[in-house]
Image (cartoon, helix red, strand yellow):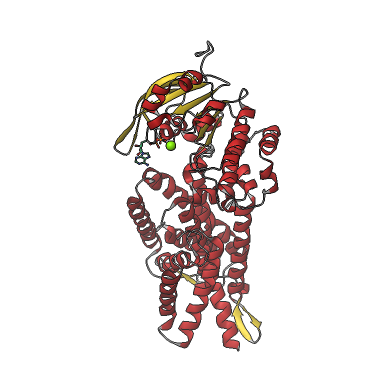
Amino acid sequence: MSTPAVDPLLRLAGVHAYIGESHILQGVDFAVAPNRVTVLLGRNGAGKTTTLRTILGLVPAASGTITFDGVEIGTEKPHHVVRRGVGYVPEDRDVFAGLTVAQNLRLAQRPGASRERWALAHALFPDLERRADQRAGSLSGGQQQMVAIARALVNDNRLLLVDEPSKGLAPVVVAQVTEALAAIKGTTTILLVEQNLAMAQALADDAVVLDDGRVVYTGPMAELAADEALQTRYLGAGGHATAHV
Amino acid sequence: MTTIVLLTLTGLALAAMYFLLAAGLALIFGLMDVLNFAHGAFFTWGAYSAWWTIGRFTAAGSQEGSTGGFLLGVLVAPVVGALLAVLVEVVLLRPLYKRPIYQVLVTLGAGLMLTQMTSVIWRPDARFFPQPGWLADTSTVLGARVPNNRFLLIAAALVVLGGMLLFLKRTRYGLVVRAGAENREMVRALGIDVDRAFTLVFALGGALAGLGGAFGAAYFGSVEPTFGSVNLIFAFIVVVIGGLGSVTGSALAAVIIGLAQQFGNYYTTWAGDFVVVLLLAAVLLLRPGGLLGDRT
Ligand SMILES: Nc1ncnc2c1ncn2[C@@H]1O[C@H](COP(=O)(O)OP(=O)(O)O)[C@@H](O)[C@H]1O
Ligand SMILES: [Mg+2]
């Protein structure tokens, strides 16, 4: 069940990246299978966010290759990568505070995006419809997260890069976000960064563990969930993350 | 009373000119964090291109310019301003987006060079701007005889203000500009070509500066190379007082500065610019983000 025979939608091979002088990604290799959820785990500072930003081209890959649907995208500009069908939900949500909810979503909607996607995003987060004309800056953290996720959902994306969607949110909101991601699972490929192991377990099929800018584990999520030693070693002390779902 | 009406309308016309210059500066700073010191040169070039155009249609030595020539000049000036702005942005600024100090130097240098070119091509001294009779004529408002070019300038600024607010609130590019002012990275991550938005904003700012130059030439009745740099200082003050990046703030601040200058200069020989500096100091101390700025 682990490595499906189909070609991966996304593959990173020997990717190195720097932020300023710091060598952050030191040869990252992993693949993301289509229509599955792959969770990227690792302690704070392991390089998870940098990995997502490198895939998008926001951080330049110094060497190595990034292949999306068979095409090398490692040297492309962010807007070209995104237009291939990549949606991004950043770690700090980064909604445009001065724009309304509807304006945030309209800005995110790329030319040619289908109506169904717009409807889907609003069906998953009915709050957004009610708050369409409210400034995004005046929303709660949970509502901002919904805007951030909806921005990625309003396009016909094939890959979603979602960075710690549960961070700083109340459990009810985490549940709602989890539900929304579960609803699109199977039709959209998701690369999810998540520290909340319960959420990771609820959603992920495959797991990749990053440590100090290198991949130290790839395999089925179920296997990782069962291996407490591995968790303790790479995901921080105490294995507190082994929450039961 | 007549004096007050005259000073108010003249002050508003001056404000309109500052606004045309400041609106572009505010947009450019808001989106790109670039202090564009070349902006005054776009204004000067707008003034000269309007002057040159009207000169093609006006008999040599005539005091009165042709209406057609003036209208054409008002079209040519923003085009020239936009072209120069695109040139500066694409050739000089684009390679330097990660190096802000160099941006300041490069826009300053480009501004000086473009200004110098006008004095080489058209002589360094002031040249008379032959405006159409109806524009130099006066209309009587509450007993005050006000030159018509003041009204034209005020009307143009109002149209530009309305147009810019519509652009920012209603168009996709307007949203890109506002969102980009908040978080450029995230706009990129939505698949938007931010570099293209930069060029567009620069072109828009350059066009407004060029237009301001054309109307400014009518306001002053002459053009000279230092035209832009003198007004640029006040435009920067307007942007700071209004709030960096806020177009409505710029409009409000322009009105305050224009009126303060006119009244100050009328009643004393020294207070006009002094009041402006005082206002700037007060805003910087009490509201460092500017009147309508949402950033500090
Ligand atoms: N803008 C930055 N400047 C310098 N170092 C950074 C910057 N962003 C991240 N880093 C460093 O890069 C490393 C990886 O960061 P990040 O990818 O954010 O990790 P994670 O998302 O796994 O917590 C960390 O050591 C962090 O300190
Ligand atoms: Mg992170």
Comparing B43 with B157, the one in front is: B157
Q: Does A121 sit above or below residue B108? A: above
Residue B169: percent from left, percent from top:
62, 53
Q: Residue at x 41, y 67 (%)?
A: B233
Q: Position of residue A12 (x, y in %)?
A: 43, 22
Between A160 and B192, the residue placed more toward the observer is A160
Is B148 on the left-hand or right-hand side of A161? right
Image coordinates for residue B278, horizontal then vertical, percent: 41, 77
Res A77 seen here: yes
Q: Position of residue B266 (x, y in %)?
A: 48, 85
Q: Residue furthest top?
A: A5
Q: Is B228 left or right of A37, judged from the image as shown?
A: left
Q: Is residue A11 left or right of residue B159?
A: left
Q: Residue at x 64, y 87 (%)?
A: B143
If the image is split into quadrants, where does the N terminus of chain B sit?
Answer: bottom right
Residue at 53 percent across and 35 percent down: it is A88
- Residue at the extreme left: A21
Along the line of sight, the residue nearer the viewer: B271 or B90: B271
Compared to A210, does B8 lie above or below?
below
- Looking at the figure, which quarter contains the C terminus of chain B? bottom left
